[in-house]
């Protein structure tokens, strides 16, 4: 069975990340300010948005940080989250930052978020590779099959 194009897979993973953060938010009342309805609006915006633009923007915003994502560098993540997700709804990005900084998110939940970020990055690398961009060194480092 053939996989959907990278931009669709990217969007699916990104929407999954929003759903996961929404669930974490429910377990940690008072840390963030988004309502469940607002999380749904973010997901609708992602689903309806230009998927190619999203993956390309993430690629250009994240490319310098792929090594830090691979190593799960939390200080980088908190310092650069606005840059990493500059094309995404600002309030959602702030919620993700608040959750990380709150100290109330479990190590397991952080691990899941890192897996989402790594998936987004791997999908982006495959997308860029298919477009002819030179990401071979990163693909080897990340051990991605293309």
Image (cartoon, rainbow, N blue to C red):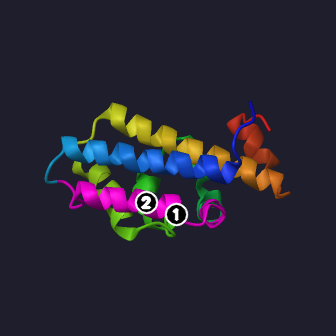
Residue at the (76%, 55%) spot, across then down: 128
Spot occupied by residue 143 in the image (x, y as percentages of width and height): 72, 34
Spot occupied by residue 55 in the image (x, y as percentages of width and height): 63, 59
Tell whether 139 sits left or right of 61: right
Q: Which residues lie in the magenta part?
A: 31-57
Tell whether 69 sits left or right of 60: left
Q: Quadrant of the C terminus?
A: top right
The residue under label 1 is: 48
* Residue 80 makes an appearance in the image: no
Residue at the (73%, 36%) spot, across then down: 144
Reply yes or no: does residue 34 show up in magenta: yes
**Rendered position, 16 above or below 107:** below
Residue at the (72%, 39%) spot, across then down: 141
**Quadrant hosting residue 92:** bottom left
**Quadrant hosting residue 71:** top right
Reply yes or no: does residue 119 show up in magenta: no
Judge by depth and name the residue closer to the eye, 103 or 13. 13
Contact, CB < 8 Å: mark 1 with mark 2?
yes
Judge by depth and name the residue closer to the eye, 44 or 103. 44
Spot occupied by residue 10 in the image (x, y as percentages of width and height): 60, 50
**Rendered position, 62 above or below 10:** below
Tell whether 60 sits left or right of 136: left
The residue under label 2 is: 44
Rounded to the nearest angstrom, the CA distance separating label 1 from label 2 is 6 Å
């Amino acid at each position: 069975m053939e996989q959907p194009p990278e931009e669709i897979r990217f969007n699916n993973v990104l929407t999954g990340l929003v759903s996961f953060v929404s669930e974490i938010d429910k377990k940690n009342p008072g840390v963030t300010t988004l309502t469940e309805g607002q999380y749904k609006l973010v997901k609708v915006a992602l689903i309806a948005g230009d998927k190619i633009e999203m993956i390309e923007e993430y690629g250009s915003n994240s490319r310098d940080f792929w090594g830090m994502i691979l190593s799960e560098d939390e200080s980088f993540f908190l310092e650069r989250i606005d840059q990493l997700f500059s094309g995404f709804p600002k309030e959602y990005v702030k919620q993700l930052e608040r959750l990380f900084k709150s100290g109330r998110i479990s190590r397991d939940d952080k691990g899941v978020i890192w897996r989402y970020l790594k998936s987004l990055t791997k999908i982006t690398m495959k997308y860029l590779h298919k477009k002819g961009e030179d990401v071979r060194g990163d693909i080897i480092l990340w051990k991605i099959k293309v």
